[in-house]
């Protein structure tokens, strides 16, 4: 399952994020911390925001985001607002919408 960068819409494998970028294990659980952090969490070129945590920006983000991305980005951000901390629900919702051809494939 993939989670999308809310800024540039790049897809990232959720297990890569949970294992390598925000490890979801042990007493120092970065994933849970990021989901509760009042400020954005930065890790290895990514910026995450609570709840979720959602990817606010990623290493694939261009300096300036193309206008064509902004409409889809607004839709995805609205879904993120609805789903709150249900990141799995968010990812599967996005996958369903992609399967229906609602987003342009890159
Ligand atoms: Zn990005």
Image (tube, helix red, strand yellow):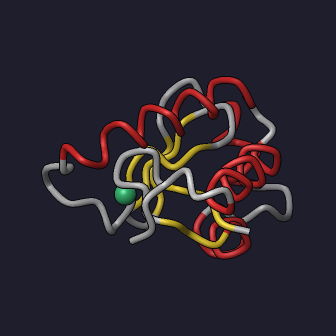
In the figure, 47 relative to 71: above or below? below
- The residue positioned 63% from the left and 34% from the top of the image is 80
- Residue ID at (36%, 46%): 7
**Nearer the observer, 9 or 25:** 9
The residue at the far left in this view is 64
Q: Position of residue 15 (x, y in %)?
A: 73, 73
The residue closer to the viewer here, 59 or 97, is: 97
In this view, 79 is above or below 95: above
Residue 22, percent from left and from top: 64, 61
Q: Residue at x 68, y 39 (%)?
A: 52
Q: Residue at x 58, y 58 (%)?
A: 101
Q: Quadrant of the C terminus?
A: bottom left
Whether residue 58 sits left or right of residue 38 in the image: it is: left
Considering every residue shown, the one lying at the far front of the view is 100
The answer to whether 64 appears left or right of 15 in the picture is left
Image location of residue 91, percent across then percent down = 71, 53
**Residue 38, horizontal then vertical, whole percent:** 56, 23
Q: Count up the numbered dots.
A: 0
User: Whereabouts is ligand 1, in terms of quadrant?
Assistant: bottom left
Question: Residue 86 lies in what quarter of the image?
Answer: top right
Q: Quadrant of the N terminus?
A: bottom right
**Based on the displayed image, in which of its 4 quarters is residue 27 positioned?**
bottom right
| Relative horizontal placement of residue 2, taking residue 10 as reference (left or right) | right
């Amino acid at each position: 399952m993939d989670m999308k960068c809310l800024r540039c819409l790049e897809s990232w494998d959720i297990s890569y994020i949970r294992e390598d970028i925000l490890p979801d294990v042990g007493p120092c659980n970065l994933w849970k911390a990021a989901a509760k952090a009042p400020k954005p969490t930065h890790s290895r070129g990514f910026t995450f925001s609570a709840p979720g945590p959602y990817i606010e920006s990623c290493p694939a983000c261009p300096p300036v985001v193309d206008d064509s991305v902004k409409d889809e980005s607004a839709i995805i951000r609205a879904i993120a607002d609805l789903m709150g901390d249900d990141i799995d629900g968010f990812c599967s919702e996005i996958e369903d919408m992609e399967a229906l051809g609602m987003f342009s494939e890159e």
